[in-house]
Image (cartoon, helix red, strand yellow):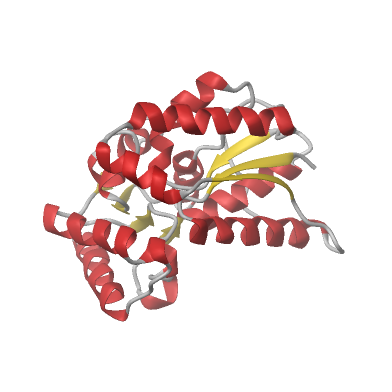
Amino acid sequence: MRTIGLLGGMSWESTSHYYRLINEGVKRRLGGLHSAKILLQSFDFHDIEVLQRDGNWTQLGEILAEAALRLEKSGADFLLVCANTMHKVVPRIEHTTSIPTLHITDATACAVKEREWSRVGLLGTRFVMEQDFYPARLTDRHGLQVVVPGPEEREIIDRVIYTELCRGIVSDESREHLLRIIHRLYDQGAEAVIEGCTEISMLVRQKDTYVPLLDTTQIHAEAAVDWALDTQWDGVGEVVEIRKR
């Protein structure tokens, strides 16, 4: 079994889901008392959020890259960034480390294509929905069409994420707001909606809507289990295909 290096704490609520899902996946696959080999670097999200708000992505990249290198030196075989938004700095991490990073958009795109969907809605922070690093990767690398909410809706989603979900607050009113947005994306032709923030699944789950949802936390964690247990894995960072079990 390979050792997984987690860059977490962004926020710790979603990182706790990663930890549980990965360990549950290993136990399901191997049985008995098996659990995952995990190294975790957990950040103070207050510090991260301030730099995000200030647009200081260079410093954020340096912080995460230094932490990733520490995980590599401590024995991690590959890395997961436990936050959709912070995948903006994955190129900096990859430049610094020699172990692969399992990219959340690649894992999600594999799940989309397995279901033979080609047009998806995207929810997330304003950085995820408005900047190219996330939707462009889905489009350019994987050939998917991406639909994002309008400006006012993006403002609502971003506010709910940072002022509620990242603080562990789950509101019925906010759930209804997000469901209306999800249904509007579906009416605009999205075949499914990507929950492109690891906290959104705390608020909206598949049981809440008829629209197919893609929980990126679940998908990313399942892919990590595959990488950790795949005996044919050759140690390179390109995700070609992720098997679903």
| 199 lies left or right of 124 | right
The image shows residue 109, relative to residue 12, as above or below, that is: above
Q: Quick one: quadrant of the C terminus?
A: bottom right
Instruction: Check the image and report above or below for 136 versus 178.
Output: above
Q: Quadrant of residue 102?
A: top right
Rendered view: 46 above or below 76 = below
Relative to residue 193, is residue 4 depicted above or below?
A: above
Seen in the image, is 64 located left or right of residue 245? left
Q: Percent from the top left, x then y, of residue 15? A: 54, 55
The residue at the point 31 percent across, 80 percent down is: 172
Residue 233 visible from this viewpoint: no
Q: Where in the figure is residue 69, as x and y percent of width and height?
A: 61, 27
Q: Residue at x 73, y 33 (%)?
A: 74
**What residue is drawn where x is 63% and y is 21%?**
98
Let me know if residue 127 appears in the view: yes
Q: Quadrant of the N terminus?
A: top right
Depth order, front residue of 16/149:
16
Q: Position of residue 90 (x, y in %)?
A: 46, 31
Left or right: 3 as drawn, with respect to 98: right
Front-lying residue, 168 or 31: 168
Quarter of the view holding residue 136: top left
Is residue 143 left or right of 178 when viewed as pictured? right
Q: Residue at x 27, y 35 (%)?
A: 55
Q: Residue furthest right?
A: 32
Name the image quarter holding residue 28.
bottom right
